[in-house]
Amino acid sequence: MSEARTLVVAEQIDGRLSAAVARVVAAAAGIGAPIDLLVVGSQASQAAQQAARLEGVAAVICVEDSAFDHLLAENTAALIQSLAGPYSHLLSASTTGGRSLMPRVAALLGVGQVSDIIAVESPDTFVRPIYAGSVVATVRSLDDRKVVTVRPTAFEPVGEQDGVDVANAASTGDQRLARFVSEQLAEGERPELGGARVIVSGGRGLGSAENFRLIEALADRLDAAVGASRAAVDAGYVPNDLQVGQTGRMVAPELYIAAGISGAVQHLAGMKDSKVIVAINSDEEAPIFQVADYGLVADLFEALPELERKL
Amino acid sequence: MKVLVAIKRVIDYNVRVRVREDHSDVDLTHAKMAMNPFCEIALEEAIRLKEQGIASEVIVVSIGDKAVQEQLRTAMALGADRAIHVSAEGRIDSFAAAKTLAAVVEREAPRLVLLGKQSIDSDSSQTGPMLAALVGMAQATFASSIKIDGDTLSVTREIDAGLETLAMSLPAVVTADLRLNEPRYARLPAIMKAKKRPIEALDAAELGVDVTPRQELVKVELPAERQAGVRVHSVDELIDRLRNEAKVIP
Ligand SMILES: Cc1cc2nc3c(=O)[nH]c(=O)nc-3n(C[C@H](O)[C@H](O)[C@H](O)COP(=O)(O)OP(=O)(O)OC[C@H]3O[C@@H](n4cnc5c(N)ncnc54)[C@H](O)[C@@H]3O)c2cc1C
Ligand SMILES: Nc1ncnc2c1ncn2[C@@H]1O[C@H](COP(=O)(O)O)[C@@H](O)[C@H]1O
């Protein structure tokens, strides 16, 4: 590792690159070093073609081996360790995949890790939220290699370029430590939370899974994704992948409509970077109003159907 | 089967965090401290494994100054059999915690190590996978359900897209997510009894672990406050403003 060079670890599913990758590349561009992209797993070569056209990428490394499907941490970390030689920086998105993988990579390389950055100040200095986003810290990494996860919503995706070269690298194979068994993915036609332009989110105020239909109906009217507070998820109104907040998804849509959500800091941590926030709550003291651009003190059982009807 | 649970002392999640005037760090003087909520969940899972006859012993460990003994005592009041305090001064980052825990794992040889998925102060979410890498074990982060059958561990994880199930052989490292269980409360007699229980004392330096932080805190700030918005008085007004003022709906 003589000069600075960045490796971005991409996530892909069924040969399609995750939308977060173009945003991680944007963060990598802020470091100022040449950027290589690593694409792994079944059908990686298909996703690699897409990766090669991301603006600012110098080269793409492809390892097509099912051992890396679901970014299985034990296998993928060993692969990245074998490839890490020339890289001063290793980045991935702070998705659940990246957050499981990159600390393992860092420990194998004998360095610390910087999580969930929202800005790059310099090649060794990064900005990241702590205490559920109630404080923003600037940290300087003292390690010779920087292993970093990036909050995708904090960076605008890079554009396109003419495709660069894709090179295949040797697989390190299956470490035989863990094995993927099954997954239960959210199905449905609604936009995905991470990339949605509009999100309609519901909380405990909805009262039941049945009533949550009100949120879904409004979301469908607005072509929006559906989100939820932890209380709504814990009460079983919706599945866990809809939870927004410190321990759920971090979102930053153009419009976030929160109905029946009080606005606990842990929830705000996940949505307060939205461009426009609307709060609908019957309690005028609810803390959600402190971050809302438009606050409507109302019974959601009246306001939501009326909104849907009039839009 | 021995189960080791890593417990971190953090600011209570209800407390509003302040920043020091010189922006050098957050100000925790007189702040109420507590066990990291995700560690409570990890500990609860270990205790349940013991109640089911799967775990034979639940050992809790915390790294930090003397104050962490308070959380270790809470853990014993909740049902942990034994507590280890690894003393280390100053800020202990995730890599330092992982290296120290690796040394403890070597001494204790647990079949299962449970951690929280994330500290609510640093929000770093690193220690579990780092520890797993250092001791060469399989890892399962963000666990919402675990099943142990002989030597096989099956873990359902909360991932961004839904749920995922992994299988691995023990020993392994698991980090607890919110929905793994609902922790119990400690009962007063147990709290009183835990006050007199011994806590094994180790020292990071004696374990040969360098806990110097790998990151320097340059400064901390409060995030830019959102401008408090306006109250709208009807659904019609809301629609009008979203359409014509904010221009976020057609
Ligand atoms: C470690 C930790 C991590 C956490 N992580 C998260 C996280 O990631 N995401 C998250 O959301 N939470 C998280 N929480 C939980 C958080 O602290 C709150 O408990 C949770 O966000 C509350 O959800 P809520 O707003 O739906 O429920 P409540 O706080 O109960 O609020 C319900 C709201 O609905 C309103 N309401 C009731 N009826 C009506 C009606 N008819 N019309 C209009 N309004 C009505 C009420 O006025 C109230 O404001 C976490 C907590 C901890 C300790
Ligand atoms: N100083 C510490 N002492 C004991 N356990 C810790 C410590 N730091 C982190 N951990 C464990 O690692 C988990 C995740 O922390 P982190 O990776 O720092 O977000 C915590 O929930 C604890 O289980």
Image (cartoon, rainbow, N blue to C red):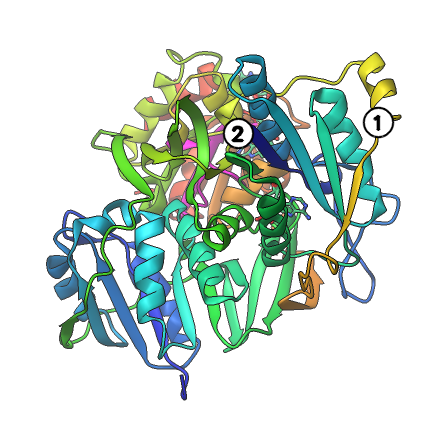
- Residue B197's tag is 1
Q: Residue furthest bottom?
A: A2
Question: Residue, x 50% and y 33% (percent of image)?
Answer: B177
Which residue is the site of mark 2?
A: B178
Q: Nearer the viewer, residue A23 or B159?
A: B159
Please give the range of residues in magenta: A241-261
Ligand 1 located in image quadrant: top right
For badge 1, the amino acid type reads Arg
> Quadrant of the image for the N terminus of chain A?
bottom left
Mark 2 or 1, nearer chain start: 2
Q: Could you say which quadrant of the image residue A139 lies in?
A: bottom right
Residue in view at x 38 percent, y 82 percent = A33
Question: In the structure shown, which secondary structural element does the residue marked by tag 2 occupy?
Answer: helix
| Residue A152: % across, % down | 40, 56
As shown in the figure, which amino acid type bears the numbered disc 2? Leu
For residue A148, side relative to residue B40 (left or right)? left
